[in-house]
Amino acid sequence: MSKATVLNRLHRAAGARMVDFGGWQMPVSYGSQIDEHHAVRRDAGMFDVSHMRAVDVRGEPSTPRDLLRYALANNVDKLKTPGRALYSCLLRGDGGVLDDLIAYFMREDWFRLVVNAATTDKDLAWLSGLVRERAPQVSLQPRDDLAMIAVQGPQARAKTWGAIAGSEAVTAPLAPFTAATMTSADFGELFVARTGYTGEDGFEITVPDVHAEALWSALADQGVTRCGLGARDTLRLEAGMNLYGQDMDERVSPLESGLGWTVDLASPRDFSGKAALAAAKPLRRLAGLLLCDEGGVLRAHQCVYTDSGAGEVTSGTWAPTLERSIALARVPAEVAAGTMVEVEVRGKRLAARVVKPPFVRHGVALVS
Amino acid sequence: MNVPNDRRYVDSHEWIRPESDGTVTIGITDHAQAALGDLVYVELPKPGRKVALNEACAVVESVKAASDVYSPLAGEIVASNDTLTAKPEAVNEDAYAAWLFRLRPDDAAAVAGLLDAAAYSKLIAEA
């Protein structure tokens, strides 16, 4: 039996079509997922992301940072100002990707990680092992008492300020990829981050479970459109962002998953997976594809034919902003942007062009 | 869920409307379009093609997934609704108006053996 987020009742009341995702019952759409997509590109939409888990890493000053300096493939020493966030992979010793996550540096005695739903238990087991070996005084606290709502789109910040009294003063100064905490008279202790998974501006708001329904309703009253996982997937793919379990997983190196920019091999610090990644030359890479022929939609697992050998689509969809089909695909490393390839779509070979993601940012098409 | 009385149905969620000239018009049901979500591509059979009973002869793709459409009767395709190629979302807007193709059945009597609206309503209510 899959788990329900604290907003489940409101999703059903709004007529959502529900699916199982990562062991959670989640809304896939409330009506047209394309309309939900456009609402985020043009105005403001909100997503229940309470299936994702906040994990607080606490300990004596500097001990959380020392642990994460080894645990994360990206370098937490880039986080110098409280509130700064860092996107990183969590790697096994052999370099396989256990998860991708965002790490927030709040204080030297408190970092917060936000991890994926399906990987939460695995991540906690892995991190607990590192704590035992390297930092037994550090505590890991999964925050099962918190819900998360992502508000995304060009009007997302203004509409959030309308919904949460007093939030503008605290969150207007936030630069992209930073977070702040605040106490709201209506919704309790909030953690507001200027982050997201859509390629648009906006916030990801962590709210106590008991206030989540009230916050969701207050945002709806501001005209923020309810959006499901369907729109979340087309938005993140247009934004060129990976989905864990689909575009990368434990079997593939992050260097072959478009995540080389997040792996800090340059600094002298050691981290889990570093030696394995330094020893292996990537043979493949994750590229963007733009379908050029009519005849279908790019989908995960379709075969890609290139002059340098075969590849595979890892995520594909119809892109509502571009009104054409796009994909992420793992192809031989030498296949460069601009190259024409063929993709097997339901028995036919259709022409596609290799492009460098993202496809869309801040409502603007970057490929054509 | 909307299930009009003027036509027949099959359990793979196609509707079949008999026409006065002995042909039948075929589309997908409102239940099917709702399950698929926003359609973005359709592929239709060419007139003149002979199709067998339950032969996959059209494709509807939504943002989420591709789905075959099966011919509910054996016969010859006499027309296809090419306006859908440029506007597949017409199926979401009105699945019973946005027909996919028309065929002349080999056995005109076979239509009467398909599900009526009440039987199809019961089928989707149980699903």
Image (cartoon, grey):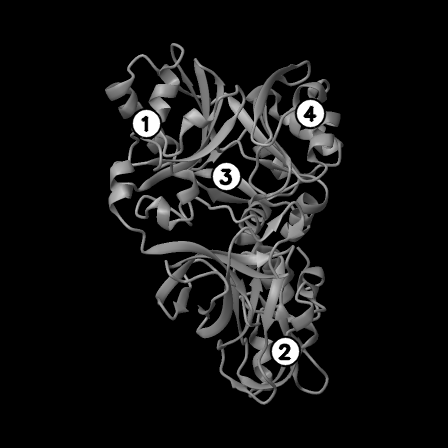
Q: Is residue A195 visible?
A: yes
Asked if badges 3 and 1 are on one and the same chain, I answer: yes
Secondary structure of residue under mark 2? strand
Secondary structure of residue under mark 3? strand
**Mark sitting earlier along the chain (1/4):** 1
Mark 3 Cα-neighbour bin, 10 Å: few <14, some 14–19, many ≥20: some
Q: Is residue A189 visible?
A: no
Give the residue at x 32% y 52%.
A282
Q: Is residue A162 above or below residue A232?
A: above
Q: CA distance from mark 2 to mark 3?
A: 37 Å
Of badges 3 and 4, nearer the viewer stands: 4
Q: CA distance from mark 1 to mark 2?
A: 61 Å
Quadrant of residue A306 within the rendered picture: bottom left
Q: Which residue is mark 4?
A: A172
Q: Is residue A313 above or below residue A67?
A: below
Q: Which residue is mark 2?
A: B101
Q: CA distance from mark 1 to mark 4?
A: 33 Å
Q: Which mark is residue A70?
A: 1
Q: CA distance from mark 4 to mark 2?
A: 55 Å
* Camera-nearest residue between A54 and A110: A110
Give the residue at x 57% y 56%.
B35
